[in-house]
Amino acid sequence: MKTKIVSIVGARPNLIKLAALHPRLRKDFNHIIIHTGQHYDLELSKHFFDELDIPEPNYNLHVGSATHGIQTARILSGCERILLTEKPFTVLVYGDTNSTLGGALAAAKLRIPTVHIESGMRSYDRSMPEEINRVITDHISSLLLCPSASAAKFLKKEGITKNVFFTGDVMYDIFLKIKPNHLVLKRFNLKPKSYYFATVHRQENTDNLQRLRQIFNIFEALDRPVILPIHPRTRKALSRIKISLKNTKLVEPVKFSDNIALEQNSSVILTDSGGIQKEAYWLRIPCLTLRNTSEWLETVKSGWNHITDLDSELILKYTTQRVKQSKTHPQYYGKGDSAKKIIDVIKKWL
């Protein structure tokens, strides 16, 4: 009989990481998937399951949108109920979402060993819900699998040295596997390198309407059109500030392969997303991060990612004068074999 393992996911970044691991988990374990329903765009979530070849989850909690406290509590309660029924040997949580924290808390309180995929990431900005999620999850997890060598060093600084492994980033595995869908350019009437690609979804940017207005005023002042797949939270916030957009083209959220193609063909990427900072690095596209911190410090250190926050002069400089491309491009996040390394570590640990 195969050892039972439960994966807990709930948002797009979780699903991408799960997609890298599921084929090996399915082969070697009895793999149960809990979808918390944190990502409340169910149609988009279904697209990700189909595109990334992830099976329908065994359970869906349908927690939906709510405050952080209510959403995390619903996830904790729902996962606890299922874990008591399934009685897995271990639980896998991914990244830094509320599903990550809620799932890890449920497992820890039931004394079920927890594996944290993408452990050790730090921005040292406690105003970010993601930072709180990842720090707490690391401190209650039993096996900590780090996407970079620096992440393992951060854990050591916090006194976490047992069962810590640098395995590389499973997101890179999927990045290498997914073929960009360049037909998306025709759909949006775009030519390569004729536009900027942007994403805005972080709470600190969407909940602060003054910051949100400032971001879109910057986009409107740029010398090329800005293509922005709109997050539901951002769309709701934008409706409250009633800004007229001429240079910024809002599009519905797209598939992962479309997203990669839009990034790859842009001249510069502007984002507050952690995952897209890495994708920009792997694509060798200059990135401007619309925050004052980044957990992906290697991309900044190498010169491909620039922390601009909302400094309009700096953003205009980096776009109108074009960001000088760095000559260094180390493989900070592994070679695309992270899923294999993770499964090997888990099997030895069990």
Image (cartoon, rainbow, N blue to C red):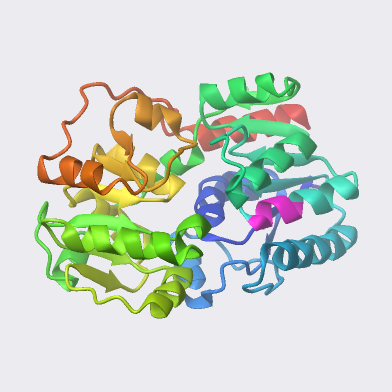
- The answer to whether 75 appears left or right of 41 in the picture is right
| Residue shown at the point (22%, 26%) measured from the top left | 326
Q: Position of residue 124 (x, y in %)?
A: 58, 35
Residue at image position (58%, 38%) is 118
165 horizontally vs 169: left or right: right
Q: Residue at x 37, y 31 (%)?
A: 299
Residue 100 on the magenta span:
yes
* 139 to 35, vertically: above or below: above
Q: Is residue 131 above or below residue 208?
A: above
* Closer to us: 121 or 35: 121
The quadrant holding residue 56 is: bottom right
Look at the magenta stretch and give its main secondary structure: helix
The part of the image, by quadrant, that contains residue 282 is top left
What is the quadrant of residue 329 in the picture? top left
Q: In the visual, does 260 lie left or right of 168? A: left
| Frontmost residue, 282 versus 273 | 273
The span picked out in magenta is 98-103
Q: In this view of the protein, which residue sits in the foreground, 77 or 203?
A: 203
Say which residue appears at 18% left-offset and 31% top-offset: 325
Instruction: Tell me if 200 is positioned left or right of 106 in this view.
Output: left
- Residue 30 percent across, percent down from the top left: 73, 52
Image coordinates of residue 296 in percent, x first then y, are 45, 34
Q: Which quadrant would the C terminus be assigned to in this image?
A: top right
| Whole-percent x, y for residue 132 in the image | 66, 45
- Look at the picture and state if 30 lies above or below 57: above
